[in-house]
Image (cartoon, helix red, strand yellow):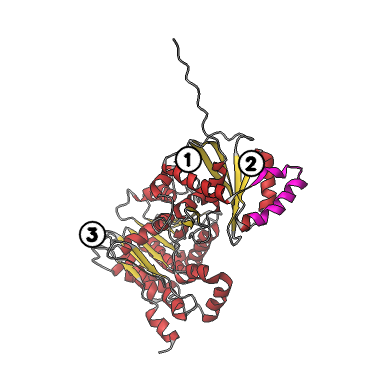
Amino acid sequence: MSLQADVLTEAQQPQILHEPADVHSLVDANEAIELGEAYGPKLDEAQKITLRTWMGTRKDGTWAAFQAGHAMSRQNGKGDELQVRELFGLTQLGESIIHTAHEVATSKNAFLRLEATLLNYDDLRKLVKGRPRHQNGDEAIFFRSGAEIRYKSRTGGSARGFDDISLVVYDEAQHLKAEHLAASSPTLAVNPNSQMILTGSAGLSFSEPWWEMRLAALRGAGGRLGYVEHTAERIWFDEAGRLTSVRPDPDDPHTWAMANPAYGRRITDEFFAAQRLVLGPELFLREHCGVWDQLPSMLAQQGAKIPEIPWQESVTAAFPKVIPGELFMAYDVEIDGSHSGVSIATGDLSDGYVQTIEHRPGVGWLPKRLVELARTWRPPKILLDGASGAAAAALGEIREEFERAGLDPNVLEPMTSSAYKAACASFLQAVVDGKVHRPEVENDRLHMAGMTARERAIGDAWVFDRRNSPEPIVALTSAAMARSALSEPVEIPKVFAF
């Protein structure tokens, strides 16, 4: 059998399938499929499997799956699945639906697709009340039956104020955050037959809600969860309860086939071959083969140097007042120049505060940005690892930029190898002892670096390992260097009265 023929039959089956308990009937699911195909394209078998997983009902007629999801690479038809589910709910069940997406453009595209379907067929158009609302980021379609669907880009409060909602859709679930769920999922509370559906591509390193659904499916959690995933990644829990995965070969067409039900139908070999060259192996595996990034908490279990609990506890909501001239700064550059970071430290060694204030790809931005920061904050020292080739290589250009700006380049201070090793060890001990604090920042690179940084032994000492840590760690190394410039606390002499 040829690869293409093999793809058309076997790639339709999901690699992860968790069906909800207590499914009594698939009548609604099958009717939804018929309805969808009557007003839209013929569905792939993979799409039908997903809809039956989502739309099985219990004996009392309620959805067996309160939480439902489908993880699959882009361009494989998740949008068609969502439209079929929504069309059935709106026209047959009179549902009130909120459809959310991370990007305004994604939400609007879903709105335009459904609007076109409804307005292109006389029998469907007669069900619509008035004209669909075209308001960027807040589109809506209302029905004579009282059903309605609202499209929103996600914010922390985008669904607050609504109640008695039947269905909330979270498209682009790889970008979904807990606060988005907190804002919208309570709208389902008073509806006796409500449902939430998450769809998206492979999870990112900060996709906590998406990962939680995936892990629940992998563990075989019972109850009202229906989850489908198409991926070329082999992933399972071993006998010791450890999550284990095997990454596929990005150059093997069977890898492409396994993760993409549309391969051989709507996606071609030529497209994947071109994408493989453009994206490189890691991004290609994530974007087109369903290989997920690991969460920092998962990576932390795989050799991270800083213990997870004290690192989590170092977050503080009480930000100290940062005074120009009374803080220290440091910069660092990844060995391959892929990222650079700048951090500050203030306070003292017994109660220090650190924060990464810049973290960007590349190095070219660093000289001018350091000049801007030096002018604003007037640090007495800007430290760097003098033994790090990448950081030291940038020093010459940074010095020149300082001189052109009329700033003293002598504030730029390379650390010796022994001083840098001491800074790493001291930072670790301070975290463990609760003597270092940092802010809670969304998508914080310092947090991620601390959760994942590994160590590299150097004789009897060690340093944080820029080369073999799974994430960029310049946020952490620059914070450790900046903190090393802090002073010991000043002891106030005791006064004795006689």
Query: Would you say 229 lies left or right of 382 here?
Result: left
- Residue type indicated by callout 1: Val
Write down the residue under mark 3. Answer: 60
What secondary structure is marked by label 3? loop
- Residue type indicated by callout 3: Asp
Sequence-first disc among 2 and 3: 3
Q: Main secondary structure of the magenta part?
A: helix
Looking at the rendered structure, which numbered label has been put on residue 436? 1
- Residue type indicated by callout 2: Lys
Residue at the far bottom in the pictured view: 1
Looking at the rendered structure, which numbered label has been put on residue 381? 2
Tell me the quadrant of the picture where the N terminus can be found: bottom left
Q: How many marks?
A: 3
What residue lies at 46% left-to-right and 46% top-to-bottom?
428
At label 3, counting other C-alpha atoms closer than 10 Å, the crowd grade (few under 14, some 14-19, many 20 or more) is few
Given residues 226 and 354, the one toward you in this image is 354
What secondary structure is marked by label 1? strand
Query: Would you say 30 lies left or right of 247 here?
Result: left
Instruction: Write down the region rendered in magenta.
Output: 392-413
Residue at the far top in the pictured view: 498
**Residues at discs 1 and 3 in contact (Cβ within 8 Å):** no
Q: CA distance from mark 2 to mark 3?
A: 70 Å
Q: Nearer the viewer, mark 2 or mark 1?
A: 2
Q: Is residue 189 magenta?
A: no
Residue 436 lies, with reference to residue 281, above or below; the image says above
Provide residue 284's location: percent of width, then percent of height. Answer: 51, 70
Given residues 203 and 385, the one toward you in this image is 385
Tell me the quadrant of the picture where the C terminus can be found: top left
What residue lies at 71% left-to-right and 45% top-to-bottom?
409
